């Protein structure tokens, strides 16, 4: 079965991008709220950022530090999740 592609107006795309930029919420959360694909919205945001890179204010020193801290935490959580996933698969396989 083929599905027809949804078409979005430039105005809709702009509003969706503004939600991401202004709210500070993750692209995934806003995409879910709007009922669109996360990759699609991410692409729109990336395109907007490339077109408006001069307009964005640079991060302050405290914002950079916080970003670095969150990136480190994100890496650690991904590693923990991967470990727990492998452990769960191991014990599920052993239990059978």
Image: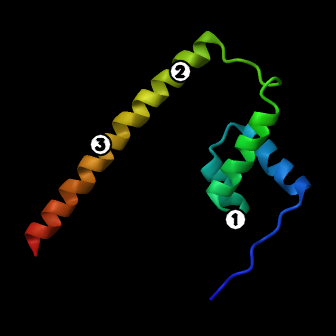
**Badge 1 or badge 2: first in the primary sequence:** 1
Circle 1 residue: 35
- For the residue pair 38 and 70, the one nearer the viewer reads as 38
The residue lying furthest to the top in this view is 61
- For the residue pair 14 and 52, the one nearer the viewer reads as 52
In the image, what residue occupies the spot 71% across and 17% down? 58
Circle 2 residue: 66
Could you tell whether 34 is left or right of 27 in the image? Answer: right
Q: In which quarter of the image is the C terminus?
A: bottom left
Q: How far apart are marks 1 and 2 (CA)?
A: 30 Å
Q: What element carries label 2?
A: helix
**Badge 2 or badge 3: first in the primary sequence:** 2
| Labelled pair 1, 2 in contact (Cβ < 8 Å) | no
The label shown at residue 61 is: none
Q: Is mark 3 on a helix, strand or loop?
A: helix
Give percent across and percent down for residue 23. 73, 39
Label 2: few (<14), some (14–19) or many (≥20) C-alpha neighbours in 10 Å: few
Give percent across and percent down for residue 28. 61, 52
In the image, what residue occupies the spot 22% across and 55% down? 86
Could you tell whether 75 is left or right of 58 in the image? Answer: left
Give percent across and percent down for residue 37. 65, 61
Circle 3 residue: 80
Label 3: few (<14), some (14–19) or many (≥20) C-alpha neighbours in 10 Å: few
In the image, what residue occupies the spot 73% across and 44% down? 45
């Amino acid at each position: 079965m083929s599905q027809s592609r949804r078409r979005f107006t430039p105005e809709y795309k702009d509003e969706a991008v503004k939600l991401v930029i202004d709210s500070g919420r993750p692209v995934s959360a806003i995409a879910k709220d709007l009922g669109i694909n996360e990759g699609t919205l991410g692409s729109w945001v990336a395109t907007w950022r490339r077109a408006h890179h001069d307009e964005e204010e640079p991060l302050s020193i405290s914002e950079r530090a916080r970003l670095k801290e969150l990136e480190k935490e994100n890496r650690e959580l991904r590693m923990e999740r991967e470990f727990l996933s492998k452990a769960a698969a191991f014990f599920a396989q052993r239990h059978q």
